[in-house]
């Protein structure tokens, strides 16, 4: 079991789905948690704190806005004193064929998915560099590696995250900061729950393990990369996709 006791993690997009599960699994390993979402989730933070016996606070923040992130991260550092882990998980989808895709649908996905990684990483970087240690884990996707029609905006944002991950890993290594990405495949979320059974079965048939992943599967991968055991791993993209990207 990877022990994170005494460490503090910031998790963006943490109000539900994969982000919430990441926060919960990190907390179960002893990490204090700063939840970042578009609106404060105080009740959720209190539930995590009570369940796992850690410090957990929620912060409302626009992760693509420099001023909003700077203010939130300053407050987090003041409260927790030290931040060891940043999980850039926030993301949205606005799928559509390129010919019909609205400019705002492209811009919104790039802003929330990709620009947020730049803004949040930059906001915590000086703090981590000063401490000469840190773990940054970015949420990429199988669609940033091998994609499908109708996801030009999403695929571009996730491929961009992979490129930023590798570049940042090279920049920050001398300061003891590792930067890695996790690339989930088809994961059971609120979005997949809305799909018809025949489409789910079609997706499963193309996955070597013949099943969809769970949010916990992604969270465990993030937990490993956040741990001391992953100290010599940086600039990597860890696929959590049932073999889809093999």
Image: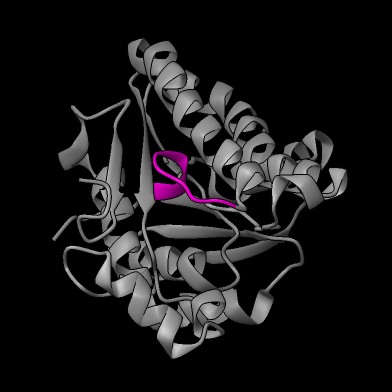
What colour-coding does the image apply? one colour
With respect to residue 191, does 226 lie above or below? above
Q: Please provide percent x and percent y for residue 214.
A: 33, 73
Q: Please provide percent x and percent y for residue 141.
A: 44, 48
Residue beneath the point at 28% across and 55% down: 240
The residue furthest front is 99
Please indicate, yes or no, whether residue 212 appears anywhere in the rendered image.
no
Q: Please provide percent x and percent y for residue 153.
A: 66, 43
With respect to residue 204, does 228 lie above or below? above
Tally of numbered tags: 0
Residue beneath the point at 25% across and 75% down: 211
Q: What quarter of the picture does the C terminus occupy?
A: top left
Please indicate, yes or no, whether residue 174 appears anywhere in the rendered image.
yes
Q: Is residue 215 magenta?
A: no
Q: For the stretch drawn in magenta, what is the main secondary structure?
A: loop
Q: Is residue 243 left or right of residue 80?
A: left
Q: Please provide percent x and percent y for residue 69.
A: 73, 41
Q: Is residue 123 left or right of residue 100?
A: left
With respect to residue 129, does 236 lie above or below? below
- Quadrant of the rendered image containing residue 227: top left
**Residue placed most toward the observer, 99 or 81:** 99
What segment is highlighted magenta in the picture? 142-149
Q: What quarter of the picture does the N terminus occupy?
A: bottom left
**Residue placed most toward the observer, 78 or 106:** 106
The residue furthest bottom is 197
Q: Is residue 220 left or right of residue 160?
A: left
Residue beneath the point at 40% across and 80% down: 200
- Quadrant of the rendered image containing residue 30: bottom left
């Amino acid at each position: 079991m990877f022990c994170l006791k005494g460490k503090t993690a910031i998790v963006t997009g943490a109000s539900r789905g994969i982000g919430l599960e990441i926060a919960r699994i990190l907390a179960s390993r002893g990490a204090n948690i700063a939840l970042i979402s578009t609106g404060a989730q105080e009740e959720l933070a209190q539930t995590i704190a009570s369940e796992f016996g850690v410090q957990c606070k929620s912060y409302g923040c626009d992760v693509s806005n420099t001023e909003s992130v700077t203010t939130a991260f300053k407050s987090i550092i003041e409260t927790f004193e030290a931040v060891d882990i940043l999980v850039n998980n926030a993301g949205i989808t606005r799928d559509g064929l390129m010919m019909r895709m609205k400019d705002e649908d492209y811009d919104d996905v790039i802003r929330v998915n990709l620009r947020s990684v730049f803004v949040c990483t930059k906001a915590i970087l000086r703090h981590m560099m000063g401490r000469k240690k840190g773990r940054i884990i970015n949420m990429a996707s199988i669609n940033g590696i091998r994609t499908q029609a109708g996801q030009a905006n999403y695929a571009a944002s996730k491929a961009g995250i992979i490129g930023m991950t590798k570049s940042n890993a090279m920049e920050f290594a001398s300061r003891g900061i590792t930067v890695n990405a996790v690339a989930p495949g088809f994961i059971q979320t609120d979005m997949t729950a809305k799909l018809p059974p025949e489409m789910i079965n079609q997706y499963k048939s193309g996955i070597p393990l013949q099943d969809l992943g769970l949010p916990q599967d992604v969270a465990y991968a993030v937990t490993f990369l956040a741990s001391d055991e992953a100290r010599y791993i940086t600039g990597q993209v860890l696929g959590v996709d049932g073999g889809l990207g093999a």
